[in-house]
Amino acid sequence: MNILQLCKKFPYPAKDGEVIGIWMYSKGFHYHHHQVTILAMNTRKHFSHPELVPNDWKNVAVIKHVDVNTNVNFRKMFLNLFGKGCYNIERFYSVDYEKQLIHLLQNQNFDLIQLEGVYLSQYVSVIRKYSKAKIVLRTQNVEFEIWEREAKAGSYLRKKYLQLMASRMKQFELNMLNQYDAIVPVSKRDAETFKQLGCKIPVHTCEHGVDTNTGLLRQAQDDRHAEQFSVFHIGSMDWRPNLLGLEWFIENCWPTILEEIPDAKLYLAGRNFPDDWKQKKIKNVGMIGEVENASSFIQSKQVMICPLHAGSGIRVKLMEGMSFGKAIVSTTIGAEGLPVENGKNIFIADEEAEFSNYVIQLLSNAELRNNFEAEARKLAEQKFDYRVLVGELLNFYSEIVKA
């Protein structure tokens, strides 16, 4: 097949969950001998230098990009309040991107076009006009649910605004629901949600997948070289659910952990730290920011946390952490969609006391931690390898293309 992926982020470097997920699909398509083209937005917020893309990446896919300004425009955001559209969707419409898409469709015959997220759905009509390719929405989240969950906290005006955006996002998703040829969510839970909302087109669940065969992963036999009593979180710090989750953990859990283990240290890593976070001075907390090598960072620490209380979909970083054999404590929402077993390969807790206690147990009991690490690696090898997952997805796609 000749496959086109439309993305709202440039796929290099793969330093956040969304980009890692996108690139794993590209690698999977290439591994199974399909042609891959990527048309990506190169936004100001997540700007990358295309000339730095390494040759081995270029061998996987033809990567094209369009510079797009998706920064919040407060005037447009205000005027949007008096319309019916969803501003958070409209931010990702670009005339230049549409022109480049049309040029691609006029000059190449694609069998299938994979939209990397609901924000690319506003280009469906253009695709239908210029191509006979099948259109698939691959979605990391049920997007409106993120906004609904966020709208439960904050000031009165903030709640009202987020409720409005959630309502408009939901209406957009519902309007588009059956406009594709298929939908590929990353979790069974999201798949069920789409069906309950009225989805009548084919649905296939496919997690992001990780590379379980790299040399670094094979070296992850135990945590002897990890820093003692170290806790870590890695994820994009411009994604509000991450910030809210970390605020909850630092305020409600971290003091309890330090009371029991005074030498414990918490390391926060990720792209685009807000300025106010860079200035925070919290006992035994290191604001690392963006790391050069995420794999090395993950391996150097003992216990991974995912204290999410908003969002949906699947946490790619959790899958990556399990591939490296990390002991993990997560909330229910953080582990949502993953085939994990609480108390066996992960600890899951939503209450602050229980969450804190699990972290303390893993830090203080090496045998328990090693057991969780081994079970996490085993699950990743069985369920998360991208070659297997994408192979199953391609079987589904072959039927969609034939239809």
Image: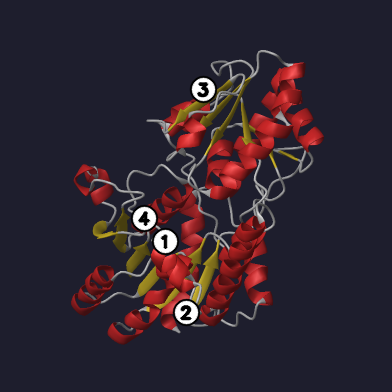
Return the residue at label 3: 300
Q: Which residue is mark 1?
A: 74
Which of the two labelled residues, at mark 3 and mark 4, occupies the earlier sequence position? 4
Rounded to the nearest angstrom, the CA distance separating label 3 from label 4 is 28 Å
Instruction: Mark 1 or mark 4: name the one nearer the start of the chain.
Output: 4
Identity of the residue drawn at 32% across and 81% down: 126
Q: Neighbour class for label 1 at 10 Å: few (<14), some, many (≥20)?
A: few
The type of residue carrying mark 3 is Ser
**Could you say which disc has been placed on residue 121 in the image?**
none
What residue is drawn where x is 33% and y is 63%? 34
Q: Marks 3 and 1: which is nearer the front?
A: 1
Q: Which residue is mark 4?
A: 9
Which corner quadrant of the image does residue 328 belong to?
top right
Q: Secondary structure at mark 3?
A: loop
Report the mark closest to the observer, 1 or 2.
1
Q: Name the element at disc 2.
A: loop
Q: Where does residue 325 sit, x and y in percent of width and height?
A: 59, 32
Q: Quadrant of the N terminus?
A: bottom left
Residue 269 seen anywhere in this rendered image of the structure: no
Per the image, the residue denoted by label 2 is 180
Q: Position of residue 89 (x, y in %)?
A: 45, 68
Q: Quadrant of residue 159?
A: bottom right
Residue 5 drawn at (x, y percent): 35, 64
Could you tell me how far apart the alpha carbons at marks 2 and 4 are, in whole angstroms?
A: 21 Å
Q: Nearer the viewer, mark 2 or mark 4?
A: 4
- In whole angstroms, how far apart are the C-alphas of marks 3 and 2? 43 Å
Q: Amino acid at mark 1?
A: Phe
Image quarter where the C terminus lies is bottom left
